[in-house]
Amino acid sequence: MRIDGCSALVTGAASGLGLATARALLEAGAHVVLFDLAGSAGEDRAAELNARARSAPRSAGDRASADAAHSHAGMDHHAGGTAIFHPGDVTSEADVAAAVAEAGTHGPLRIVVNCAGIAPAARAVGRQGAMPLGDFERVLRVNLLGTFNVVRLAAVAMQAVDPLDPGAVGPADGIDGGTPERGVIVNTASVAAFDGQIGQAAYAASKGGVAAMTLPLAREFARSLIRVMTIAPGLFDTPLLQGLPAEARASLGAQVPHPARLGNPAEYAALVRHIVENPMLNGETIRLDGGIRMAPQ
């Protein structure tokens, strides 16, 4: 699906994977709503992205894609993209509904990327006894319920937009699925969904749920011409790890078979862009982890 001229909603977009994704989609010509907590740096990040977008020329490939889009009558197109910060909580129906509505005012909402999440570590039974049930519930509420909350509300908006002309599906390299598309939803799981470590029961359960709902959602939305994909990142250089000493971060990166380093958020964003542009990617969870398989602890 062509990105240029679409509206995109990215959660957890004030930092890490979400910010890198917002940047990549903006550079591809989308209008991007950065959805994050009110206390985040989202307003500053949106301003920085807009300043960068105004000063950086678009790539030849993106210009070619936009030119091709112009040649199709009735196609959605807006010159360049804009970053907009919208504060809110993914677990709030009202907040998400407002963000979806905001995205729709800048163009047809066709792209949703869920990056918001938390990753507290705690054993089911620790030194103080059993984990408080509320702690487990909070992780599931943000990571799993929050993701589903965004999916369900965004899907309603996506179903209301006209399908993109199949003649313009795909980037300038000629990918063409021959079928119109309304939108693409990309969720974020984690390798912890498959290789959860000790102390990650809540986190692994929440991310396992995200991976598990990928196929049923893709099957449900297929008739609406909406694809659903999930990315399961490994060890990435995000704020979650940036608070660790450099030596500890290097040690974690060395556990990755190849490349033996922490992942760059831009690599996650590059996969998001490919998923959006490749019409055959649907109903699958892709591990983006350099081949790592997490040890028990």
Image (cartoon, rainbow, N blue to C red):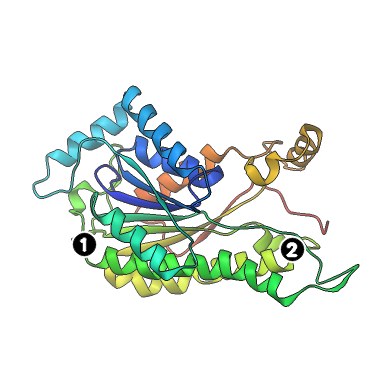
Dot 2: few (<14), some (14–19), or many (≥20) neighbours within 10 Å? many
- Determine whether, in the image, residue 191 is placed left or right of residue 160: right
The image position of residue 238, as x and y in percent, is 62, 42
Instruction: Pick whichever, 90 or 277, lies toward us.
Output: 90
Dot 1: few (<14), some (14–19), or many (≥20) neighbours within 10 Å? some
Q: Which mark is residue 200?
A: 2
Q: Amino acid at mark 1?
A: Val
Q: Is residue 290 visible?
A: no
Choose top left, top right, bottom left or bottom right for residue 27.
top left
Choose top left, top right, bottom left or bottom right for residue 237.
top right
Marks 1/2: CA distance? 40 Å
Q: Amino acid at mark 2?
A: Gln
* Residue that lies at the very extreme toward the left in this rendered image: 73
The image position of residue 287, as x and y in percent, is 59, 53
Q: Which mark is residue 113?
A: none
Q: Identify the residue at horizontal 37%, vertical 62% (top origin).
A: 227
Q: Which residue is mark 1?
A: 161
* Residue that lies at the very extreme toward the right in this rendered image: 127
Contact (Cβ within 8 Å) of mark 1 with mark 2: no
Q: Is residue 220 visible?
A: yes
- Determine whether, in the image, residue 159 is placed left or right of residue 147: left
Q: Identify the residue at horizontal 89%, vertical 70% (top origin).
A: 128
The image position of residue 101, as x and y in percent, is 29, 60
Instruction: Pick whichever, 289 or 113, lies toward us.
Output: 113
Choose top left, top right, bottom left or bottom right for residue 297.
bottom right
Q: Earlier in the sequence, mark 1 or mark 2?
A: 1
Q: Identify the residue at horizontal 32%, vertical 64% (top origin).
A: 226
